[in-house]
Amino acid sequence: MADDQNRWIRRFRSAPDARTQLVCLPHAGGAASYYRPMALRLWPDVEVLAVQYPGRQNRANEPCVENFADLTDQVVAAVRPELDRPVALFGHSMGTLLAFEVAKRLEADGVVPVVLFASGRRAPGRPQPEPDHRASDDDLVAEIAELNGTEDRLLENEDMRPLFLLALRADYRAIETYHHDPKSMVACPVVALTGDSDNRVSIDDAASWATQTTGSFDLHVFPGDHFYLNHQLAPLTDVLVQQLGALRGDSVTSNIGTAAGGPGVWPPLTASRSPVTNRPPGEAR
């Protein structure tokens, strides 16, 4: 159910006793509902705050935000008042880039996230071909279909497709306006997540996130393509819980544990920053 007091945030199941909040930022063209399965699986140990960008679902009548800095500012303004416990960030694809910038803004405000989960995206500053927001409808649909991240019914429905493409173009336009400051990093730990057959993000690309933090770094590789999340939800959420527990010094259980240091603040670990690739047994590189 949407939070009536904040149209930017979707809470699919309230978790007032959760000791950690996880802010989830969708991919280009995506919506908060993409994170509903993750929210239900992590409940009640983690409270998921899924960000809803303007121009989609319950915000379909609002104009999309086509400037990345403006989108970052608006997300931070919406999220910051909701944080009353230690917070972690999760982004996928475009959402990862946005999570990175949100983390920097939060840290500047004195809130150091427990961890930034960077999924399905190369680190900022690493060359990455970006889709052109001016491409034809057919070209955009073909590209999205190839990524296997959007339901066919959405792309084929004559009523829904124009709304989806409008949001997608706006998100692509926002990415085109993104400016990366190579001297600006986060202090929180970063955990990169990727699919082993993602044709947009290689394992080396995912490992490049190690250069974007002064804290610890880890890398997890899952079977699958750019939208490995669709088929690896159970292993993915297990990794999220394990990482949160490890970074907080808890034993690895389904209960994240009790935080010290006050709401929304967790000091970065002093640990090796060498990428560690974790794979399922027998999984080849």
Image (cartoon, grey):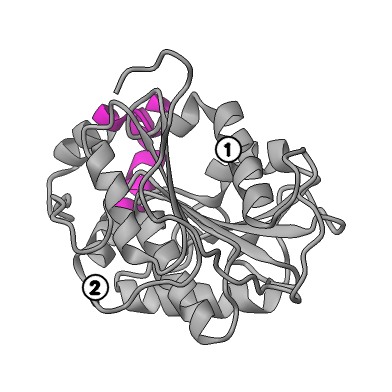
Task: Give the percent coordinates (x, y) of residue 180.
Answer: 24, 73
- Camera-side residue: 89 or 230? 89
In this rendering, the answer to whether 255 lies above or below 271 is above
Tell which tag, 1 or 2, sits nearer the viewer.
Answer: 1
Is residue 69 in view from this perspective? yes
Q: Are marks 1 and 2 in contact (CB under 8 Å)?
A: no
Indicate which disc, 1 or 2, sits on the residue closer to the N terminus: 2
> Residue 280 at x, y = what percent?
47, 21
The residue labelled by disc 1 is 239
- Main SS of the magenta part reads helix
Q: Residue at x 13, y 50 (%)?
A: 129
Point out the stretch of residues depicted in magenta: 145-168
> What residue appears at the point 12 percent right and 48 percent down from the top-left corner?
135
Instruction: Judge left or right: residue 25 versus residue 184.
Output: right
Residue 7 is drawn in which quadrant? bottom right
Q: Check disc 2 and give the amino acid type.
A: His
Question: In which image quadrant can residue 150 be found?
Answer: top left
The residue that label 2 is drawn on is 180
| Amino acid type, label 1 | Val
**Marks 1/2: CA–CA distance:** 28 Å
